[in-house]
Structure formats: C-alpha cells, structure tokens
Amino acid sequence: MIELQGVTKTYRKGRVEVPALRGVDLCIEEGEHVALVGPSGAGKSTLLYLIGLMEEPTSGSVRLFGEETARLTDAERSRLRGRTIGFVFQAFNLVPQLKAWQNVALPLHYQRRPRREQRERALAMLERVGLADRAEHYPSELSGGEEQRVAIARAMVIEPRLILADEPTGNLDRASGRVVLELLETAVEGGATLVIVTHDPEVAARAGRVVRVVDGRVA
Amino acid sequence: MAARVRGLQAAVALVSTALTAALLLVGLAAYQHGQAELASLMQVVGRDVLLLERDWSRRGVIVTPDFEVDLAEFARSLDGFERLALLAGGGKSPNRFSYYSKLVTPEYFSVRRYPLAEGRAFSMGERAAVVGHDHANLLGRRIEVFGYEVEVVGVLAPLSERGGPDLYADGTVFVPYDLMGLTVPMEAYLEFASEDALQAARPLLERWLAERKYPYMVQPLANLYGLELRRRLREVLGGALLWGLLAVLLAAATNLSAYSLARALERIRELGIRRAVGASAADLRREMLAASLFWAAAGLLLGFGLASGLSRWFAGETGLDASPTFLSVAGVGLGLVLLTLASAHPAARWAAARPPAEALRGAAASLPRRRLGLAFAGLALALAAFGAQLGISHSAQVHARRMVGEISNRTAIYTSFLFLGRHSLTDPRGTIPLKHADYTALLNSPLAERLERTAYVENYRLHEFAEPGSNLRVFVRAFEGPYLELAGPRLLLGRWPEPGSGEVALGRRLAEYLFQDLERALGQRVKALGRQWTVVGVYASAEQDAPGAPSDDQILLPRQELRRTLPGARAEILVERKPGASERVFDEVARFLTERHPEPGFRPVEPLVRDDLEPPVRAVMDRLAAAYRMLALVMLALAVAGITAQAMVDTEKRFRELGIRRALGATRGRLFYELLAPMAAGALLSGVAGALAGAGAAYAVVRAHEVTWAFSWVAVVAVVLAAPLLAALAAALPAWRAVRRPPAEAMRME
Ligand SMILES: Nc1ncnc2c1ncn2[C@@H]1O[C@H](COP(=O)(O)OP(=O)(O)OP(=O)(O)O)[C@@H](O)[C@H]1O
Ligand SMILES: [Mg+2]
C-alpha cells in the first residue's frame, strides 16, 4: 500500500545541493508496524515527509493506497493527507493559540465537519488518551507528555489508515514514552499502518519490521 | 508569553488598520472639502456679465451721450440679454477732502450683485446716494458729492471680502448716473441670462463696437475677479491635493502589505501544522484573507471613531473642514477592504505555497530579514510620498504666489497715489504727498535698523511721448535703491539701465507699441521729461498689477538721472522688513511718515501689504497649504506606525534569540545597539531612496502640471535624516523592553 521506487530528494540552497535521499525503494504493507532507524541526518524525516505527501520527491515515484501521488493536485493531496494520514512529531507541533480539543478537532475542521461533530469526536479522542479533563487547556499549559498525547489524539481522530510518527518519544521520559507508544500500538491493532522513526532500540524492537536508513539509502 | 506576543500583534494590527482608516478618512474628507474650497474659487460674481470699459489708449476719440442709447438698442437685439447698467465719473481728488464716488444707474447694484444692507436704492434723477458699508454712519445724512448735495438713502452690505473689483466698494459713495446731467459711460455692464449667451454675444458686440468706432474694450466681468488666474490656481492646488491623497494611499498600502507578510511569516510554522492535518493551500489562503478582512472591519470601526476626533483637530489646524462625508466613509470602507485584500493576498499566497515540510522544519528563519526589508520599503515609500508631497505642494504654493503676483508679505508700500488699501476709501480726506525727503529721513531714522531693504520711486505721467500727437498714457518710474528687487519686474531683453549714462528700460507693451518688435527696441533713442534716453532693456511686469510694481507700459530709469524731483511727481516708498522683525514695523513706518506731514486735511499714510490684494484667493491658498502640511504629517505618521509595529513584532519574535545571546555574555547595551543599528542603517538607505524617489516624482508631477519647479533641498536632507531617526525612535522602546527581560525568561519561551 506504500510503494516507493527510486525516490531521491535533493535540497538546494543557492549553489549548495544537499542530497537527503539518494534512491530509495521501499514497500510497506497495510497494517504493518515499521520502524525507521539510522544515524542522524540519514534522511529518515525526509522519507517520512515524502510518504506523508508533505513534500515532493526530486525524482522517483511515491504510490499511496495504490495511487500515483505525483499526479494529484494540491487540493487532492491535502484531502488524502487530511482523511487518511495521521502525523505525530518529536516537537509535538500543536497550534499554540488553540485549546487542546480544538487542536484535536483541527483535521475535522478541514474536512468541513459540523462543529458539533468536531467537538464531540475531539473530546472522545481526548478521553481515549486520558486527557478528558484537559480539553480546555492551551498547549502551553500542558506537560510535554500531555502535549504529545494531544498530538496523538489529533492524529487518530480521523481514524487514519496510516500513522507517521517522527521520534514521538524523543522528548519524553521513559514512562511517558511508553504511554505514547502504547497509544500508537492500539491504532495498529485497529488495522492502521504505523511508520515510526526512532533512535531508541527499545522502541524499534517493538516494531514488526525495522528499516535502516543510512546516508539517504535503505540498507 | 506566546499569548502576549499574539495580543501585541493583534493590537498592532488593529491600531494600525484603525490609524490607516482614520487617516484615509480624514485625507479623503479633506480632499473633498478641499475640492469644494477650490470650486468656491470659481464662484465669482459676474460670469454672465459683459463689461465694456473705456479704452484709454484711444483717448482722442470723442464719445457722445448718444452712445448710451445706441448701446441699449443693440443690446436688446442680442440673444439672452437681460439688463444694462452704466457707470461714469468716479474717483476722488488726491490731496483734498472728498468721498470716493461713482455715478451709476440703479441697475448697477443688481448687475454687480451688490445687496443693500439698509435703506433703499435710488432712482434716476434723484438727489440721493447709496454708500458702501464703511460709510454706514452716513445713512440719512446729507453729503456733498461732485459739488451736489445728496441724501444718503441706502447702505450696501460689506463687499470687500469678495476681493477683485469689489475690494473698494465698501468705501465708495454711489450717486445717480444723471446727477451731473449728461455724461458718457466709463463702464457699461450687459447682463445675460447665462454664460453661454454671454459667450455668443461677445464677438457680436466687439464687431459692433469696431464698426461704429466706439473706443471700448469688452471682457467678461468675471475676469476682473481673476477668473483665469483662479482657474489655473485651482488646477495647480487641486493637482497637489490629489497627488497628496494618492501618496497617502500608497503609504497605507505598503504598510498593510508589510503587516500581512509579517503575520504570514509569524504563522509559517502553524501553517505547516495545518497543512499536515489536511488543509490545502487554498484553505489557508481563504482563512488568511478572511482573517485580514476581519481586521479590516474591526480597524475600520475603530478608525471611524478615531477619524471624528482627528478631523476636529485637522479642522482646527488648517481651517479646512474634514468631517467625514457619506462618500468618504463609503469610499474608505470599500477602499480599505480592497486594499486589505490586495495587500494580504501576495503574503497569503506565498505562505500557503510553502511546502508543508519546509514550514514545519521552520525554514522561515531567514525570512524576518526580508520582512524588515519590506518594512523599510514601506518607510522608503512613505518618505518618498512625503517628499513628493512636500515638493509638489511647495511648488504649487510658489507657483500660486507667482500667479497672484506676490512679492513677499515682508514688503509694504507707502504711496501718494490713490492706491487704496483696505480702509483708505472710507476716509474722505486727501492723500499725503510723499517726498524724497521722507525717504531719506526714513533711512536715517532708527526704524531703518528693522528694515532689510528700502526703495523709493517717483512716478511721472507723460501726456506726450515719443511722437507728437500720440495718445499713449505712459508713466516714467524713476527709482532709487533696490527697487527692481523689491518690485520684481522681470528682465526680458538687454540689461537694466545704469545711472549716469541716460539709459532706460521699457515695459514690454510699450516697447511693442513703439518699435513693433522687442529686439528692435534695444539701442533706440526715446524722448521723455525733456531729454533723450537710450533703451537698454525690456522688462515684463508681475502677472498682476499691484501698487509699487511697474506695469508693461511704463519706463524705468534710475532717479540719479533726474538729479532732483520734477514737478508732478508722485512718490512711493517700498520697505522690506528684516526676517525677524514683526509686522508692526510697517505701522511704525506709516506713523513716522504721517508725522512728517502735520498739515491738516490728510488721512494718515497706510502700509499696503501685498497680501491684501486677493483675500479670498489667499485664504484658499493658506487653507490648502495647511492641508498639504497635514497630509504630509499623516504620511509620516503612517510610516512611523509601520516601522514601530514591525520593530515591536520583530523584537518580540527575537526574545529567544536575545536570551541566547545574553546567555553567551552579551551586555544589554551591546544588544540594544545590535537591535537598533540595522534599523538605523536600513532606514538611512530607505531615507536616501525615498528622498530621491520623492523628488523625482514631485518633479515629474510638477512638470506634468506645468508648474514652476521649486524644491527645497532642506526638505530633502530633512527627509533623509528623519528616516533613520524615526526608525531608531520607533524601534527603541520595544528593543529596550526586550533587552531588559531576564535572559532565563527569554530562554523558557517556546
Ligand atoms: N530544507 C532543507 N534544506 C537543506 N537541507 C536540508 C533541508 N532539510 C533537510 N536537509 C538535509 O537533509 C538531510 C536529511 O535530513 P533529515 O531531517 O531527513 O535527517 P534525519 O534522518 O531525520 O536526521 P535526525 O535523526 O537528526 O532527525 C540532512 O543532511 C539535512 O541537513
Ligand atoms: Mg529527523
């Protein structure tokens, strides 16, 4: 369901070219739990962003759910992303001026769901991550672990087919990290695909498959 | 902390939008009212009245009283003709007690639009008089005019405010046209139903006069009110006003786009998050535009409130009404919405088009520089607009002054002529005959210390000139002191006469009349005052006649040539006060001259100041000049608001960075300097760019309007220097607040 063929990504800044990915072939099946590991700067985040349609490859093809994504318009890519992919980041990336529940409801807002439904589903999701009582709080009023749980709720509120997590436990202590990981794994049990970037061998060990990225290539 | 920045940004956005709205509103309203003011320039009496004036260059032609009957008959045959009024006699004997009087037919008052304030008009044949407003106390009394006793039966409303030919109406005594028996008209007025009828009748009337050899010249009465001059003034002043308004708009637009970009940049990471959860670029664009519209609406509301206060202040400062009109409110409302959309759109487009991954990685880090660049572009534009406005309005004013023929209001004239100042007609006493001795006494008095320059001129009327039998009415002006600079004739050809060599300069019209060609006049010999003179120069007068200034049909020569005052001289003394001296010195000189002539029967000498000549025009000019200054201020205010807002947002955003720098050992002073130095440097550049662009724009506009180019380099330098100063001032407060925060607080910020 995720098929990358000969994918390269080169960042260009003036005359300097930074090859982040140098030809990646990768196949991930529906329902798989994959860990991306590798040294810093190897291109793991770049790979994740490409899969999540957050960026376009310099060359090669990215097929998602059987569809060639290069042919899609921005609006189509955005819709696909908004309805099927949930993102979790190391730096949480919550919108600071929105309350916890509003952050969770944000994907539904862009799906043009009625406001009532947005709120109900967001609150239900917060309940599942154990933050029902913090719904009205702003991100700056939450701890890092709580913020990440809000971010996970935001990723899962759309019942995604694919969850992309970029070092979701990187900023957390072991206990909070475990909670976050367990939440992600429940999603996999529900049938979603999970791709998780991590430096933590323990986290990688829990994945069904480990993919090593070294120097812009899949080893 | 984040909430604080957001609140600050919201406040900055709201206040700046409100300020923009208010300033635009006041600007537009001022423009509208300025237009009305300019239109009032054109509202002169007599646009439907043709004036026939005796042509004194053909004084040999005899006119009989039949002319009047003939004219009335011909007038009735003209389409749209309504009424005829006649005027004859007129004047006042210079050195003895008399009222300034005119013989007029009863229709005269209505044709000239002279309303009665009290009493009634007279009818023909009556021994009665109607007096100007200054003589209101004569109502009901019997006075002597032209040797006849008449009863004052009516008083006119005050008219001198209208200026032009009505300047002296308040001091005039009007008596029936036939008071002294048969007479010939000096002026005849033909009133028509419309201006069009007048235009159609004018050539017919001219042909009729030429056929019958009647020595009269025809022109619309409105010309005497300076209609042509007013038309050009209106163009010049109105043009400057329009360009000023455009400049305000331009400055507002750049500021708004700087804000929009600032907001978009601020939110770039947040926009990335929104993209990650499924927002398309179009969604974000729509959201951003909607938000900016919201701010526009809120700012507009606040701005309307602000504008009402501002317009009161504006009206107080300039005398020009700037209260919002329906059009200005609607125009600014719609305009601001469009302006907001137009200025927010590029930023929204740019921000929404960033690849979401890039936005999330915080790739916008290098962009604040660019944003500051935009703020400086805004400043440069505002300064350019400011400079252009200064240049245009300054040129417009200089041009307008030149058209009105002003030498300078630092100059006053004292005259033995019946040149009539504001109140001189009211006084039936005679005029003091000033002498050369008065001039030398003035030069030796302590008063001279407060005068910059002083000049003296003697006028001689020549009944015969050049050839015997010529009917030309020519004055010789024999001057002493810097008369040429003070009275301001322009040299067209040759040079000014040197004393001691029998040289003269001729007025352009006179030179043309005598020698057909100006070039041919140079080197010619002319006879005047009993001797031969050599023509060495031809001059042109200022565009409007004024006391003290030579007109085009006169002769100028240095008084040393005459050695002494000849019989029949009428003298004028011109003085210019020192820049620091108060205007009171003019009155003191007047008192000084008056006291030298203690003989009874003379009215005191009065200073004639050039400003008195066209009061309504001057009033309009002054009000508009004040409005220009306000517009320029408005633009500076916008620029400063823009820079302040950008500086505030910028330093708030850099708290974290400042904390890091402090942690690494930077002192507060050093950081403060680091924050301000680029501001000042960037602003200096924008200042130079703005001043150059402004001067260029002003020059282009001024040329396009065919206005005299007058640009003060002081203004340019001021603009260049003002820019860094303003920017530094604008950035100083937020920068100081930023560096005073404890570094730990800054580090904890997300
Ligand atoms: N916008 C950009 N411009 C230039 N180079 C970039 C850009 N974004 C990423 N890179 C470069 O691409 C390479 C891969 O970056 P990437 O973030 O994918 O690494 P990573 O494997 O996620 O590393 P880490 O484990 O440290 O997060 C790096 O060398 C990085 O410097
Ligand atoms: Mg990474």
Image: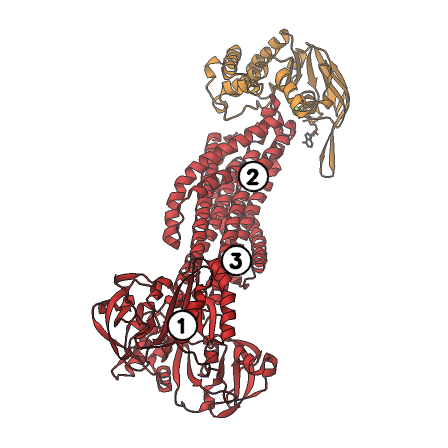
Chain colours: A orange, B red
Residue B658: mark in rendering: none
Residue B205 in the image: state x and y as whole percent: 49, 68
Q: Earlier in the sequence, mark 3 or mark 2?
A: 2
Side of B662 relative to A88 (left or right): left
Q: Quadrant of ligand 2?
A: top right
Q: Which residue is mark 1?
A: B68
Instruction: Please name which of the two marks, 3 or 2, marks the residue nearer to the observer.
Output: 3
Q: Quadrant of residue B193?
A: bottom left
Does any atom of ligand 1 lie closer than 8 Å to the CB of label 1? Answer: no
Instruction: Please name which of the two marks, 1 or 3, marks the residue nearer to the observer.
Output: 1
Instruction: Report in which chain the residue with disc 3 lies.
Output: B
Q: Give the secondary structure at mark 2.
A: helix
Instruction: Report in which chain the residue with disc 2 lies.
Output: B
Give how far apart the Cα atoms at labels 3 and 2 are: 27 Å
* In the image, residue B213 above or below residue B626: below
Residue B132 in the image: state x and y as whole percent: 29, 67
Residue B343: mark in rendering: 2
Does any atom of ligand 1 lie closer than 8 Å to the CB of label 2? Answer: no
Residue B704 in the image: state x and y as whole percent: 58, 58
* In the image, residue B118 above or below residue A61: below
Q: Quadrant of residue A166?
A: top right
